[in-house]
Image (cartoon, rainbow, N blue to C red):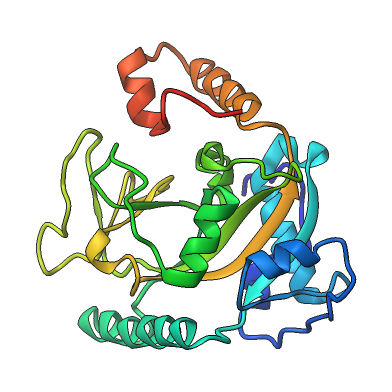
Amino acid sequence: MEEQDDPVSMTVEDFEGGEAILEDSSGSETDDQLAHFAGLLKIGEETREYDGVKNTFLTGMKGHAKDTQVVAIYKNSASTSPMKARFAAFKAFEQVVSQKNGGQGNANVKYGWYSGSKEDISQIISHGFALCNGQSHGLGVYLSPTNFLLDGLEYSRADENDMRHILLCKVIMGKMEVIPAGSKQRYPRSGEFDSGVDNLEAPRRLVVWTTFMNSHILPDYIISFKAPSSTTLLINRINEIRNLGFVSVSALHLTMDVPVEVEF
């Protein structure tokens, strides 16, 4: 088995099904963030849940973990009526997809990262997903598997406090189909499939079609953190890809699936 850069004793998957232990954030330096992310609860730093989410995040940061500070972690408590409705829709579709694929938990629920600006993430928490964020392997909502966090982190933007924010979501993947690079696919190829990936054995992109973006994706946590700039991460990633061998500019754009212009 391949060793990870930074071994962790517990990840968010280990905590799945446990009780959330939350702290009162009144008077803390992250009060303004909590107010911005309406309906969320700040997780206490001394809890197993906090450690599990933090370890998952820092493991995904790989070599950048040493330069990354986790400032706070917030949990979706489904405290508002719209949040409760989206939670109910997710659970209902999880059951539907499971039954369609033979039952016995075959909804194939995975965790995935989704990054953006603080305003983007706030809107998603309050109102749900509204836009596609990727097109290299079909048009849909793209999330990165937990071990490929850096693939999607270039979309993050520092806020007025130089903090960045990323969603850790539960994703109903069901039966996945491979979407070729450059495809303009918008829907499942047939009723047999539920979602798309770039590679079945080791996917780096989880593609949820827009038809299902607010029923098959459930934001679970927000991690607020300070890290190297998006430009630094982007340059490092380009260098990593180039080290694998010759890659054309057009192929590199398709692989990275990020805007040409990067905001600072």
Q: Nearer the viewer, residue 54 or 22?
A: 22
In this view of the protein, which residue sits in the foreground, 239 or 106?
Answer: 239
Q: Quadrant of residue 128?
A: bottom left
The answer to whether one can see residue 111 in this image is no
Q: Is residue 5 above or below residue 91?
A: above
Q: Residue at image x 51%, y 27%?
A: 262
Give residue 167's position: percent from left, percent from top: 56, 59
Q: Is residue 155 above or below residue 40?
A: above
**40 horizontally vs 72: left or right:** left
Coordinates of residue 242 in the picture (x, y in percent): 50, 16
Please determine whether, in this image, residue 189 is positioned above or below residue 239.
below
- The picture quadrant where one finds residue 29 is bottom right
Residue depicted at 25% across the width and 86% down the height:
99
**Residue 68 occupies which quadrant of the picture?**
top right
Q: Is residue 196 left or right of residue 193?
A: right
Total of numbered circles in the picture?
A: 0
Can residue 251 be seen from the camera position used here? yes
Residue occupying the point 27% across, 79% down? 97
- Percent position of residue 52, x then y: 73, 67
Q: Is the C terminus in the top left, top right, bottom left or bottom right quadrant?
A: top right
Q: In x, y percent, where is residue 107?
A: 35, 77
Instruction: Depth check: give the residue in front, 208 or 5.
Output: 208
Q: Residue furthest left?
A: 190
Residue drawn where x is 71% and y is 88% of the image: 19
